[in-house]
Image (cartoon, rainbow, N blue to C red):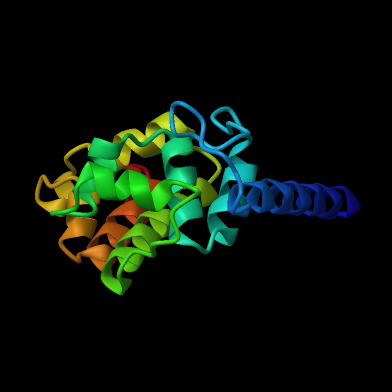
Amino acid sequence: MKGLNGDHERLTQEAAVRLAELERPDRPPTADGLAEPNLEQADPRLWRQLFLSARTPRVQLTLLQQFGFNDRELLWALPGLSGRTLRRWRSSGDSTEPPAARREQIDDVRAIVGLLLSDGSFDNQVIVAWLTARQEDLELMRPLEAIGEGRFREVLRAAERFISPARPIDAKG
């Protein structure tokens, strides 16, 4: 048990350090718009801790980009928003906060990614693929598009079913 607590504490500390780096107001953007350090290959448990702890839209958007979402995909959850505005919200030098409705949509995406990471079975690619592919549970709509339409609860239920699909009935019992 002590080993599990030590591992959890290490992940919590590492997440706190990385978030502090992302939240620095003087953090210069890199050429590709990603904040340093790049977390692309990070442990899924660290990703989960980061997503659970990220509170500002700028940090949430940066984490979502580093996780593997491109701007076009993120804009599905933010209909009517321009790519330029999305990049401005993500940049470190801009103090402009998204309106409340947009902050909620960004947080909805963050919450679903965090839920999918909680299972521990899925890596970045699987989660991004699920959120960007048409899902039968959502009437063949992409989960990110459904979030953009305010259908968070439906996406949440679909994500829960994706994590724990119904088990087939055993013919013997």
Q: Is residue 21 visible?
A: yes
Which quadrant: the N terminus? bottom right
Q: Is 62 left, or right, of 134 in this rendering?
A: right
Which quadrant of the structure image shows residue 112? bottom left
Q: Residue furthest right?
A: 2
Q: Residue at x 71, y 54 (%)?
A: 16
Q: Residue furthest left?
A: 139
Q: Is 127 left, or right, of 145 in this rendering?
A: right
Query: Closest to the observer: 55 or 139?
Result: 55
Q: Is 110 left, or right, of 7 in this rendering?
A: left
Query: Closest to the observer: 163 or 153?
Result: 153
Tell me residue 96's x, y (percent): 39, 62
Query: Closest to the observer: 59 or 170?
Result: 59
Tell me residue 109's x, y (percent): 36, 55
Q: Residue at x 47, y 45 (%)?
A: 62
Q: Is residue 173 visible?
A: no
Q: Residue at x 16, y 40 (%)?
A: 134
Tell me residue 34's x, y (percent): 49, 34
Tell me residue 12's x, y (percent): 73, 54
Which quadrant of the structure image shows residue 43? top right
Q: Residue at x 58, y 31 (%)?
A: 38
Vertical position of residue 140 compared to residue 129: above or below: below
Q: Residue furthest bottom?
A: 100
**Total tally of numbered discs in the picture:** 0
Which quadrant of the structure image shows residue 53? bottom right
Query: Closest to the observer: 156 or 146?
Result: 146
